[in-house]
Image (tube, rainbow, N blue to C red):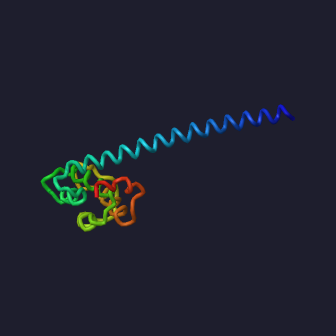
Amino acid sequence: MFVLLLTITKINRTGVKVFLATAAAIGALITLTLSIICGGVGEMCKKVDNGDCVVGLISKVEDSSLSFGERNRAIWALGQLADKRALPTLNKYFKGVPLRRELPERELSQYELEKAIKWCTEGNVTSWMYFKYR
């Protein structure tokens, strides 16, 4: 009986160690991913001339002299920020449900517009990270 109890205790300790190591690795991966996403939005906000990141990104989407790639990156950033002020501009360029993911350098991405509109309307799980850019 004592041997069985000792064996169960060893298994439980090993299980706890494995669980904690796995949880730490997942936590580190999530933190890294969120840092990369937040950094991407931060870089987009640094590139706008206006002090208000959302207004500056809206201007980029509206600026037809910019490449489609740059405008699509601004649409992505607006979706990440999930600010309702972007909705009129996003809706202006959204033609309907995308049939496919477009080439971002050739046209405004209906896929990105759809996501950005959804997040600006319903909220975005990560939008809390961007409080300093509003």
- Residue drawn at x 33%, y 53% is 101
Give the x, y percent position of residue 84.
Answer: 31, 66
Label total for image? 0
Q: Please tell me which residue lies in front, 100 or 13.
A: 13
Give the x, y percent position of residue 41.
Answer: 30, 50
Q: Is residue 79 left or right of residue 16?
A: left
Which quarter of the picture shows residue 90?
A: bottom left
- Residue drawn at x 22%, y 48% is 46
Q: Which residue sits furthest front?
A: 132
Q: Which residue sits furthest top?
A: 3
- Residue drawn at x 20%, y 56% is 51
Which quarter of the picture shows residue 107?
A: bottom left
Q: Which residue sits furthest left?
A: 65
Give the x, y percent position of residue 95.
Answer: 27, 65
For the question of whether residue 98 can be seen, the reply is: no
Split into 4 quadrants, where in the image is the N terminus?
Answer: top right
- Residue drawn at x 83%, y 31% is 3
Give the x, y percent position of residue 110.
Answer: 29, 59
For the question of whether residue 18 can be seen, the reply is: yes
Which quarter of the picture shows residue 9?
A: top right
Q: Please tell me which residue lies in front, 80 or 71.
A: 80
Q: Is residue 122 left or right of residue 88?
A: right
Split into 4 quadrants, where in the image is the C terminus?
Answer: bottom left
- For residue 97, above or below residue 74: below
